[in-house]
Amino acid sequence: MNRLLRYGLFPQLSPRARRGVLLGALVCLLAGSPGCSVKRLAINQLGDALSNGGGSFATDDDPDLIRDAAPFSLKLMEALLAEAPRHVELLQALASGFTQYSFAFADQPADELEDKDLAAAAVGHARAKRLYDRARNYGLRGLEVRHPGFEKALRANPTAAVRSAKKADVHLLYWTAAAWAAGISLAKDNPDAIADLPLAAALIDRALTLDERFDDGAIHSFMVTFALARPGAGPDSVAKSRQHFERAVELSGGFQAGPYVSLAENVCVKQQNATEFKALLEKALAVKVDARPEWRLVNTIMQRRAKWLLGRMDDLILPALPSETPKPK
């Protein structure tokens, strides 16, 4: 995920104006005043700001601080959305925000717990699944606002339904697909969830067709993993995954750790390639987090995952079996 928690509050406003709008919005929301002009201003300003992506979270180098701060932002957006339920920019921001929050602060910590406490890890993964589903639902609502009847059509004929989506919908397509696929990956024992995988595939395929350069290669980075798990993945799935990896690195200029981690964790483990596994994760760790400040947070988090994977290398990749010495005749 290339834009981990990459949203900010009112980036186009001065700090003083930002505080004033936020305070006014909270007062109006708490008072329940339907005609409060400040509240309407806050909804419009916040929705527009979030859709453009602020840098206050993305440039931070302290994931723990963002973990504690993000829930307030998400709940504020939900409160504002309750007052403007068809605000596409807020729906879009909530789809991306909950997806990213779940990955960084629910799913990954649960992964890290598996070797220590399976029960606690299961609880963490269940929470991550709920957050991914929440993100998916916001994304589908956004697509429904822009294309009435979209979800019903998607469930009836995914390939035909996504043809109505345009380039302006790529953000929603991407985050809805990412949340949906991530949730399904945590529900592999649920046939109903698995049955939805072609729907997520249709969304991400359409996004790739419309704008393969989106967010400096975010779709290609996602496809490094998804190419192996998607419906109908065949013998060429590894080759396709590698092609997406190369394009993701090209579009990001090699300044994102995510593609290296994804290829190592998925393709190298699948192929039991210890040498490449280690080399890729070392490349991820070599990415300079300050070289691109807008990717500082996501790179910090992905480097944490790279370190964790390196620590589990002996569990993920089995040692090569010794070759048998021919018996003398």
Image: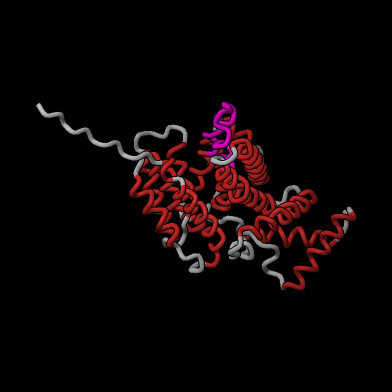
Q: Quadrant of the C terminus?
A: top left
Q: Is residue 271 left or right of residue 194?
A: left
Residue 183 within the segment the image draws in magenta: yes
Residue 143: quadrant of the picture: top right
Q: Residue furthest front?
A: 328
Q: Which of the two residues, 103 or 74, is positioned nearer the viewer here?
A: 103
Taking 231 as reference, is 38 left or right? right
> Extreme left residue here?
329
Where is residue 111 drawn, in percent x and y? Answer: 55, 43
Residue 285 position in % (x across, y down): 45, 59
Location of residue 279 with respect to 189 vertically, above or below: below
Q: Residue at x 64, y 52 (%)?
A: 97
Percent position of residue 198, x then y: 52, 34
* Location of residue 210 in the rendering, given as x and y in whole percent from the top left corner: 49, 50
What secondary structure is the stretch in magenta mostly built from? helix
| Image vertical order of residue 29 relative to residue 326, above or below | below
| Residue 5 belongs to the span the image colors magenta | no
Name which residue lies at 39% across and 53% down: 280
- Determine the image quadrant of residue 45: bottom right
Relative to the observer, which residue lies in front, 288 or 218? 288
Query: Residue at (48%, 53%) from the top-left corner?
Result: 307
Tell me if I can see residue 77 in this picture. Answer: yes
Span colored in magenta: 176-200
